[in-house]
């Protein structure tokens, strides 16, 4: 590509926190442009098959009907995240500030979780997961994408720790870190946090 002016974009760190407030899945956002010439606002909503509130992650596949053949189970899939990015360039209009995401990593940060007596317990550490994913963030634009946030394997990893025998649910910050390069080849990261509740939701 030919540019009228080479853009020197040093580094991008965007920190977005999605807070699950009173079970309603509300989000709040903050963003930093740093020296990139681009502001990025992002939101994420965690969704799982059959659950009714954003952030509820079902970790047990319940039997809905054992009297039929084959046995009928509830829907049980990877939990997803719907992410929206809004970009605003503060550079002159003739500067192309397109950003290219090529992969992301999901980390699960345990949060204090109440047991049935009101005591606070710390859920178990879970392994991070990573995927390749192409998302193009245009200059002064908006784009949405759906990503996997909690795969079935991670649900089973949590369930197999036995934590649900100690507390009804485990609270986590699901942290998604996106990796990419600007159109001039400089690396950047974007971090989006969403709070989640890992539990046995009967969705039959």
Image (spheres, rainbow, N blue to C red):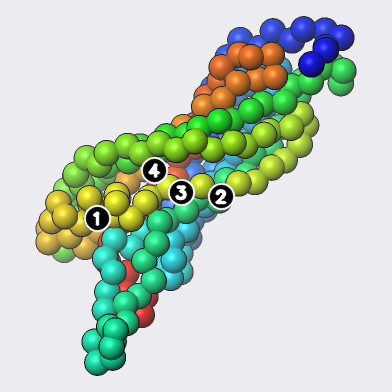
The residue located at (67%, 34%) in the rendering is 136
Is residue 145 in view from this perspective? yes
Give the labeled residue for mark 4: 174
| Sooner in the amino-acid sequence: mark 1 or mark 4 | 1
Give the spatial CA distance, label 3 vs label 2. Answer: 7 Å
**Left/right of residue 158 with respect to residue 150 in the rendered view:** left
**Tag 1–tag 2 contact (CB < 8 Å):** no
Does residue 110 lie above or below 177 as drawn?
A: below
The residue located at (56%, 20%) in the rendering is 188
Q: Secondary structure at mark 4?
A: strand
Q: Secondary structure at mark 2?
A: strand
**Tag 3–tag 2 contact (CB < 8 Å):** no
Q: Secondary structure at mark 1?
A: helix
Mark 2 vs mark 4: in front = 2
Give the spatial CA distance, label 1 vs label 4. Answer: 16 Å
Q: Residues within 10 Å of mark 2 (few under 14, many from 20)?
A: some
Give the labeled residue for mark 3: 148
Give the labeled residue for mark 1: 156
Which is more toward the observer, 116 or 188?
A: 188
The residue located at (60%, 46%) in the rendering is 145
């Amino acid at each position: 590509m030919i540019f009228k002016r080479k853009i020197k974009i040093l580094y991008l760190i965007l920190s977005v926190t999605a807070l699950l407030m009173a079970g309603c899945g509300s989000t709040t956002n903050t963003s930093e442009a740093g020296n990139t010439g681009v502001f990025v606002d992002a939101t994420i909503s965690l969704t799982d098959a059959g659950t009714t509130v954003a952030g509820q992650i079902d970790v047990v596949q319940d039997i809905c009907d054992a009297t039929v053949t084959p046995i009928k189970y509830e829907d049980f899939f990877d939990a997803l995240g719907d992410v929206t990015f809004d970009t605003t360039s503060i550079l002159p209009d003739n500067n192309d500030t397109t950003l290219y995401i090529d992969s992301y990593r999901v980390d699960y940060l345990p949060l204090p979780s109440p047991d049935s007596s009101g005591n606070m317990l710390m859920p178990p550490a879970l392994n991070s997961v990573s995927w390749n994913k192409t998302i193009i963030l245009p200059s002064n634009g908006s784009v949405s994408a759906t990503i996997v946030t909690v795969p079935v394997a991670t649900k089973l990893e949590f369930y197999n720790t036995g934590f649900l025998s100690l507390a009804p649910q485990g609270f986590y910050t699901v942290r998604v870190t996106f990796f990419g390069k600007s159109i001039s080849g400089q690396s950047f990261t974007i971090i989006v946090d969403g709070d989640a509740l890992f539990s046995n939701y009967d969705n039959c």
